[in-house]
Image (tube, helix red, strand yellow):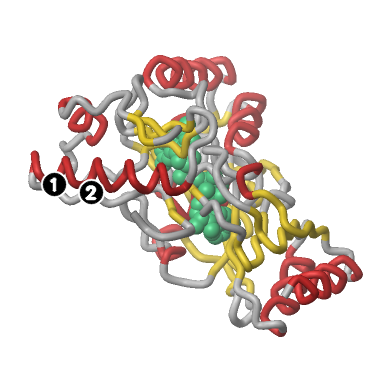
């Protein structure tokens, strides 16, 4: 089995595709949990991404994609799969009020450019530690706004056919933490946002205000994957509901319900995937018992689902 991974490693490497063997996924997820991936691949452009896909498909190896790993938790056991990081897709530019960012660009970099160039519209993303690709797939949002509100279109790679095409925002099936990218084997290569010209200082102020609000209300000082659960209905705030059940600070192993925001599960040091899954199951059960509400996770679990 190990020989197979080594052969694929050599094949990818010889094609000038950056790849590592047995890479700890805990290094690549913000909750700092996860065993190793047999192959961890960093394509730096569409050509090498497509080449890597061909190698994996020919060898019948399954793969997963990863952006900034801020909405993902990987199992403790080693994964006999490939993980493709989009972090090498780093292009970022503006033109005529539009901003185009490749999938791997961290959202804070997008916001820095918005401040520099006086472009308004994306300030609500301030403090979300994701990448552009992850934010599009998740339709990331805050303060009653989400990516769908400002997205013009997306460059997409169909992983099955190799075709590259442009998808308009209205065609992307956006909903609350929902998009067409959940249903298709499609990769977001880049996204184009329609923004408005504004005073640079006003954009900066707004970005900083959002950051301050997050610092006051979220456990940013500890590893986490953000809000664990989706809001089941508009006015049901999971954090408040969990807090009312007296679960703030409740701990299984080193995974704990945050003292600061009960919608977050934090890693106090050596939390395992199993600790988080057990805690999620407990919260789901208590919320169902007390409120008659079924919670769905927003965080993506790459192992056994809670
Ligand atoms: C402290 C904290 C605060 C947060 N606050 C918010 C918030 O306010 N609002 C919010 O919406 N989210 C929030 N999040 C969650 C998370 O940051 C967002 O969901 C973010 O958009 C995920 O981006 P990512 O690049 O980290 O995705 P990842 O975790 O890397 O990936 C998430 C999913 O997207 C897929 N994916 C990644 N890149 C691509 C691509 N290029 N093409 C297709 N699929 C891809 C992956 O396969 C995976 O299934 C928070 C997280 C943290 C840790």
Q: Is mark 2 within 8 Å of ligand 1?
A: no
- Of the numbered discs 1 and 2, the one sitting upstream in the chain is 1
* Position of the N terminus by quadrant: bottom right
Residue 280 located left or right of residue 155: left
Residue 289 located left or right of residue 1: left
- Determine the residue positioned at 9% across, 44% down: 289
Q: Position of residue 34 (x, y in %)?
A: 57, 48
Q: Nearer the viewer, mark 1 or mark 2?
A: 1
- Tell me the residue that label 1 is attached to: 288
Under circle 2, the secondary element is: loop
| 3D distance between C-alphas at marks 1 and 2 | 8 Å
Under circle 1, the secondary element is: helix
Q: Can you tell which quarter of the image residue 183 is in?
A: bottom left
Mark 1 touching mark 2, by CB under 8 A? Answer: yes
The relative height of residue 81 versus residue 101 in the rendered view (above or below) is: below
- Tell me the residue that label 2 is attached to: 295
């Amino acid at each position: 089995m190990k020989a197979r991974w080594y052969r694929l490693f050599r094949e990818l490497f010889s094609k000038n595709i950056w790849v590592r063997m047995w890479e700890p996924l805990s290094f690549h997820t913000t909750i700092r949990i996860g065993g190793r991936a047999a192959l961890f691949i960093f394509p730096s452009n569409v050509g090498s991404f497509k080449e890597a896909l061909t190698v994996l498909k020919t060898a019948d190896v399954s793969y997963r994609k990863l952006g900034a790993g801020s909405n993902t938790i990987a199992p403790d056991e080693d994964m006999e799969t490939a993980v493709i990081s989009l972090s090498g897709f780093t292009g970022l530019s503006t033109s005529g009020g539009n901003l185009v960012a490749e999938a791997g660009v961290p959202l804070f970099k997008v916001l820095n450019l918005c401040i520099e160039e006086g472009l308004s519209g994306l300030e609500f993303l301030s403090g979300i530690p994701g990448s552009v690709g992850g934010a599009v797939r998740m339709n990331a949002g805050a303060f009653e706004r989400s990516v769908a509100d400002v997205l013009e279109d997306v460059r997409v790679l169909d992983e099955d056919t190799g075709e590259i095409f442009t998808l308009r925002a209205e065609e992307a099936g956006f909903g609350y933490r929902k998009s067409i990218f959940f249903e298709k084997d499609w990769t977001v290569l880049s996204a184009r946002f329609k923004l408005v010209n504004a005073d640079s200082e006003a954009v900066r102020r707004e970005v900083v205000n959002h950051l301050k609000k997050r610092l006051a209300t979220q456990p940013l000082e500890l590893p986490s994957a953000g809000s664990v659960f989706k809001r089941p209905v508009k006015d049901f705030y999971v954090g408040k509901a969990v807090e009312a059940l007296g679960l703030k600070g409740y701990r299984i192993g080193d995974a704990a319900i945050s003292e600061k925001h009960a919608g977050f599960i934090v890693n106090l040091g050596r939390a395992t995937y199993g600790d988080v899954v057990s805690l999620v199951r407990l919260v789901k059960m208590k919320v169902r018992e007390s409120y008659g509400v079924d919670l769905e996770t927003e965080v993506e679990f790459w192992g056994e689902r809670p």
